[in-house]
Image (cartoon, rainbow, N blue to C red):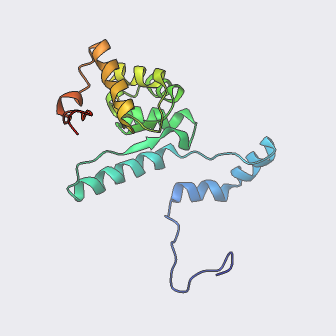
Amino acid sequence: MTPGSRTPGLSLPAHPDPPLDAVLRSGLPQELAYAFGGPFHLLLPDRFDANTAAFRAALAEAGADGRTYFAKKANKAAVWIERCAMGGTGVDVAAVGELREALGHGVRGEDIVVTGPAKAGDLLRVAVLQGCLIAVDALDELDRVIALATATRSAGCCCADSLPPRRTAASV
């Protein structure tokens, strides 16, 4: 297959969005590109709200117990985090700056998931203090989370009581 060619019979049409189509036909994007001297992002908060609602509806329709999380790294615009805070959509963060920004825009710790490998100590500390969900990638990271939760007496950490006994050289 060559670049730009299509597989016969397969297509994915654009999702119709009349308000967006009206903006695109108005000439405003071209005027803004000229005024800014180049490309820019056209943000559609109402479309974001509709998409997150559709994800929640699909989970409910399927009888699946799940959450929708917006990846903070996907777009730095504050409007997305504000929409998450207002609409109860979770936020996925991987750095302490992202976590602090989400908290600063009103996202509750319980609505934040912390992901990524080799998490920094300050990221884990703030996440434990705020009751965030932490995706633990390694046993040493789990030990750090448990130590932080114990030191801060965090009621949100429930993982330590549900772990199997740690294997030692004597138990192997």
Location of residue 164 (image quadrant): top left
For image coordinates 46% across by 22% down, the residue present is: 121
Q: In the image, is 117 to the left or to the right of 162?
A: right
For image coordinates 35% across by 29% down, the residue present is: 132
Instruction: State the quadrant of the C terminus.
Output: top left
Instruction: State the quadrant of the N terminus.
Output: bottom right
Report the front residue among 69 and 138: 138
**How far from the left and from the top, in percent, is residue 33?**
76, 48
For image coordinates 32% across by 19% down, the residue present is: 147
129 to 138, vertically: above or below? above
Q: In the image, is 15 to the left or to the right of 163?
A: right
**How far from the left and from the top, in percent, is residue 30?**
74, 53
Tally of numbered tags: 0
For image coordinates 42% across by 20% down, the residue present is: 126
**How far from the left and from the top, in percent, is residue 86?**
39, 33
23 to 10, vertically: above or below? above
**How far from the left and from the top, in percent, is residue 127?**
39, 25
26 to 40, vertically: above or below? below
Most distant residue in the bottom direction: 8
